[in-house]
Amino acid sequence: VNDKLRAQFSVALKQFLILLDAILPRAEALSYIGDAKQLAYIYARARNRYRDTVELGKDVGQKVRALIDEHVVSLGIDPKIQPLELTDPKFAKYASSQGSDRAKASEMEHAIRSHIRKHAQEDPELHAALSKKLEQVLKSCGQHWDDLLKKLQEIIDEMTGKEEKHDPLTAGLPGYCAPFMRLVAAAHTDPGKPLTEEKVKALQTLTGEVVAVMATEIQENRDLWAPRKAADQDALNTEVFTQLVNAGMDQERAGILADKLLATAKANTSKLMVI
């Protein structure tokens, strides 16, 4: 189901439920309750599958909300409980219970998409690569479900750490430095010109120095990302920019990279606080 169709369904359903709530408990409304329950169940199933749809809000009305929530829960879906993430130990069993191979593949695909959306800012380059890999797998496998399920599981294993992959870019670096090294390496890599081993080592050293500066500021300035600390954020950005330029990077690229590094540092604040 495409995104546009799902969005149209969500809007139409909410309008229908709001109108139904307005005329309940008049007799004219009773014949529509069955439709409301069935449509709400479809909405809940789609929300659990696609993981990008918000819960039906309180704006649909308390009378209707009570009816549809009771119905949806009776069919095994609690709207208040978020769908299982692929990092949950129970996810594999849950995905396998989806019936057809097509349904299993859809569950796995959208769990991967959800994970990428939620964690993209923590490691932009890694998750961009995973997103590209997912699209390639979906395109190459098509409806060959056995192959697709196998390839999707490989992506999940990679994302959950069950399948360790050697990355020469980050080998030897502390784990918290990896997202930053991938950004630094991408900014220094030209199409068709892979980085030499010597260059990788130099960029690892630069990355370690930049991360140390950002981590120190985050640890000493506990509310660094608060709006009132914009001046401190700008000062840190300038310091990182200067490090990059002093390492030989041109100012335009350094400015873009500094912004990305700070955004990634913000997303990884909890990790940088304890190094």
Image (tube, rainbow, N blue to C red):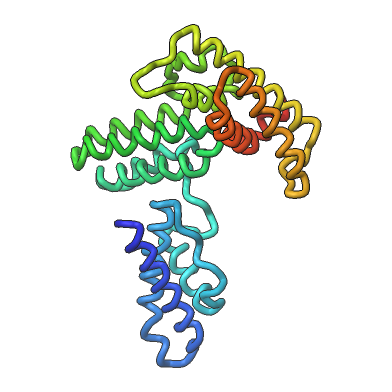
* Residue 86 coordinates in the image, percent (x, y): 45, 39
Give the side of residue 25 with respect to residue 271, left or right. left
Q: Residue furthest top?
A: 198
Q: Taking 229 as reference, is 77 left or right?
A: left
Q: How many numbered tags mark residues here?
A: 0
Q: Give the answer, above or below, for where 233 lies relative to 74.
A: above
Q: Position of residue 35 (x, y in %)?
A: 35, 76
Drawn side of residue 258 relative to residue 142, left or right: right
Determine the image quadrant of residue 27.
bottom left
> For the point 66% across and 18% down, which residue is it?
209
Q: Residue lying furthest right in this view? A: 220
Q: Residue furthest left?
A: 144
Above or below for 11 versus 75? below
Indicate the quadrant where residue 256 lies: top right
Q: Quadrant of the C terminus?
A: top right
Q: Nearer the viewer, residue 236 or 154?
A: 236
Up-down: is 76 above or below 130?
Answer: below
Q: Position of residue 123 (x, y in %)?
A: 52, 32
Q: Residue at x 74, y 32 (%)?
A: 218
Side of 137 relative to 15 (left or right): left
Q: Quadrant of the N terminus?
A: bottom left
